[in-house]
Amino acid sequence: MNYRDFLQKVIYVIINPIIKGMIKIGLTPNIVTALGFVLNCVVAWMFSKAALAFGTDQATAYSFIGWGGALILFAGLFDMMDGRLARLSGKSSVFGALWDSTLDRYSELVTLFGIVLIFVMAGTEWFMMGVVTFLALVGSIMVSYVRARAEGLDIECKVGLMQRPERVVVTAIVAIIAGCTQNLWWLAAGMILIAVLANITAFWRILHCYRELNKDNKQ
């Protein structure tokens, strides 16, 4: 059992009582998915408020960044709960999988866009970190895109170091630490890590698909 499977089992033990409560009150997986997206939109709003506050009140700016990071973690629970709710309630559907995947991409886009705004507004010395965050955003989307294309070719493609759960955790933790320490370099370090590893993961998956397709051709 790898670390992701172990962590998932631990989290399921924690959230299962919540899931049962959701089933009782009639919440559907698609509603939970939408709620997670709304929370990520709130995160983007908090990051944009942080960006605007940098010129006048840095303490407020870092406070928004820290709380935004904490909210990312909370929103991440919804990302786990919708799938678990679908399985336990017997309401899994093809559309639900599409809805979940689509809103996951939107959530990541709006969150990282908020961080781009932070670096752009924090001062000219941080401008390049805004570019790096954009590269992190590109890598994050391409990781998911390559997997989707691979699955369309009947290739299982889950290889790589920086999948969505890792990206969410890294973004949340560095935002929290940056907010608590009032040091933007923590957020910058997280974006550099995601930019490098997410893009490596995207090309890793392309290479994996190339090998799988060649293996099938040889057979």
Image (cartoon, rainbow, N blue to C red):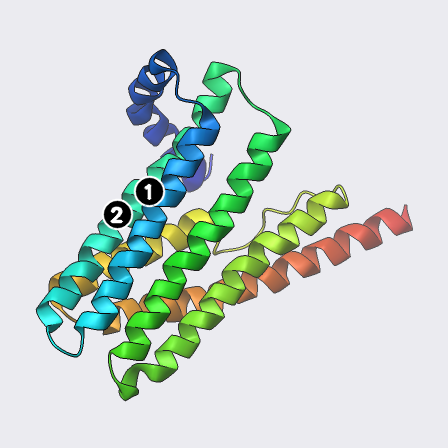
Q: Which residue is mark 1?
A: 75
Residue at the (62%, 60%) spot, across then down: 204
Determine the image quadrant of residue 69. Answer: bottom left
Quadrant in the picture for the C terminus: top right
Residue at the (45%, 58%) spot, across then down: 109
- Number of on-image labels: 2
Q: Is residue 135 left or right of residue 215?
A: left
Q: Nearer the viewer, residue 148 or 41?
A: 41
Residue at the (47%, 56%) spot, across then down: 162
Q: Is residue 159 left or right of residue 161?
A: right
Q: Secondary structure at mark 1?
A: helix
**What is the distance, in whole Å, between disc 1 and disc 2 at their CAs?**
6 Å
Rendered image: mark on residue 71? 2
Residue at the (76%, 55%) spot, across then down: 211
Q: Is residue 187 left or right of residue 60?
A: right
Q: Amino acid at mark 2?
A: Leu
- Residue 135 x %, y %: 48, 71
- Residue 161 x %, y %: 49, 56
Q: Residue furthest bottom?
A: 124
Mark 1 near mark 2, Cβ–Cβ under 8 Å? yes
- Residue 145 x %, y %: 62, 54
How would you rate the neighbour count of disc 1 (Cα within 10 Å): few for under 14, some for 14-19, many for 20 or more?
Answer: many
Q: Is residue 56 visible?
A: yes
Q: Is residue 92 left or right of residue 69?
A: right
Q: Secondary structure at mark 2?
A: helix
In the picture shown, does residue 217 fall above or below 18? below
Q: Is residue 83 visible?
A: no
Q: Amino acid at mark 1?
A: Ala
